[in-house]
Image: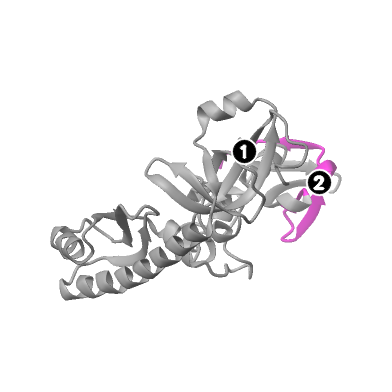
């Protein structure tokens, strides 16, 4: 969408990504004509930043947008792009320097990424660690080398997986790298509700944490199972009474033991009634 076309007093929400696999952020695009894939300069909590436009959405309530969002300042100029490229060179150099100092000081941390603010007021070093790390001497090394504000920020392994990307066990691009804008809550209960084997190798992603996709169908499984008899329940079928052994939620079926050592698979529509199992 080109904001020059049929321009009126409506507002525009511009979604911007600062890193290739990073989260999307929203900005007020009023007065700055931009299109998808444009590089833009926006105002953030930490000052000016350069990012890529991922989408532009027209809305009616322009005043409300201006109140809630920080603005897109301008399309990136050739000077802006040159500065961004120079900042990338500094980030690569700082990454190698910091990595070397971490090894020299034998610190139990893993450097993941370095980000140089667009206005060059601060270098941010992202790292992972299993426990608290005393990096005060490392900060002194970095300040002495780059003469700017230094921040070391610990991130968790899900964020690291998003930054590096890769393929999941399904053979597709990692959800966190491909389309997720934020991380939701994922619990072992979600795996149980979907009748998955609770084998860490089967339900964990490349980050070593529970797979994000466990949350995608959780609500659907939970709703569908409300209408299905639980495992262990006695049910009456046209063939006789039996005990529910397994649920096949996606097929809306159950597997029933009729007591003769054989199991039969039936649709839940074939259930005449459900009984509570007799106590032993």
Q: For the magenta stretch, what is the residue range?
A: 252-280
Q: Is residue 59 above or below residue 241?
A: above
Mark 2–mark 1 contact, CB under 8 Å?
no
Label 2 sits on a secondary structure element that is strand
* x, y percent for residue 75: 57, 50
The numbered disc on residue 181 is: none
Q: Is residue 46 left or right of residue 69?
A: left
- Viewer-closest of 174 and 202: 174
Closer to the eye: label 2 or 1: 1
The percent coordinates of residue 11 (x first, y second) are 65, 32
Is residue 201 a member of the stretch shown in magenta? no
The residue lying toward the viewer, choosing from 181 and 1, is 1
Q: Which residue is mark 1?
A: 13
Q: Is residue 257 visible?
A: no
Q: Position of residue 266 (x, y in %)?
A: 81, 51
Instruction: State the quadrant of the C terminus.
Output: top right
Would you name the residue on which mark 2 appears? 240
Name the residue located 49 percent from the left edge and 45 percent from the top edge: 42
Q: Position of residue 41 (x, y in %)?
A: 50, 49
């Amino acid at each position: 969408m080109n904001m020059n076309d049929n321009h009126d007093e409506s507002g525009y929400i511009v979604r911007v990504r600062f890193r290739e696999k990073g989260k999307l952020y929203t900005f007020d695009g009023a007065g700055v004509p931009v299109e998808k894939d444009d590089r833009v300069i926006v105002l953030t909590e930490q000052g000016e930043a350069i990012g890529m436009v991922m989408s532009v959405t027209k809305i009616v309530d322009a005043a409300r947008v201006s109140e809630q969002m920080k603005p897109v300042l301008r399309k990136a100029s050739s000077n802006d792009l040159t500065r961004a490229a120079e900042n990338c060179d500094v980030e690569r150099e700082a990454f190698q320097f910091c990595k070397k100092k971490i090894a020299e000081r034998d610190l139990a941390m893993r450097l993941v990424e370095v980000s140089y603010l667009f206005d060059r007021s601060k270098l941010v070093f992202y790292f992972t660690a299993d426990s608290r790390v005393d990096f005060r001497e490392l900060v002194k090394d970095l300040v002495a080398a780059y003469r700017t504000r230094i921040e070391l920020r610990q991130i968790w392994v899900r964020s690291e997986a998003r930054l590096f990307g890769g393929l999941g066990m399904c053979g597709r691009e990692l959800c966190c790298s491909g389309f997720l804008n934020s991380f939701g809550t994922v619990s072992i209960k979600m795996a149980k509700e979907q009748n998955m084997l609770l084998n860490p190798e089967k339900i964990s992603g490349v980050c070593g944490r529970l797979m994000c996709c466990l949350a995608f169908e959780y609500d659907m499984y939970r709703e569908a199972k409300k209408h299905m008899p639980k495992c262990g329940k006695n049910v009456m079928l046209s063939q006789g009474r039996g005990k529910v052994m397994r649920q096949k939620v996606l097929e809306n079926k159950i597997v029933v033991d009729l007591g003769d050592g054989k199991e039969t698979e039936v649709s839940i529509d074939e259930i005449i009634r459900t009984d509570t199992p007799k106590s032993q």
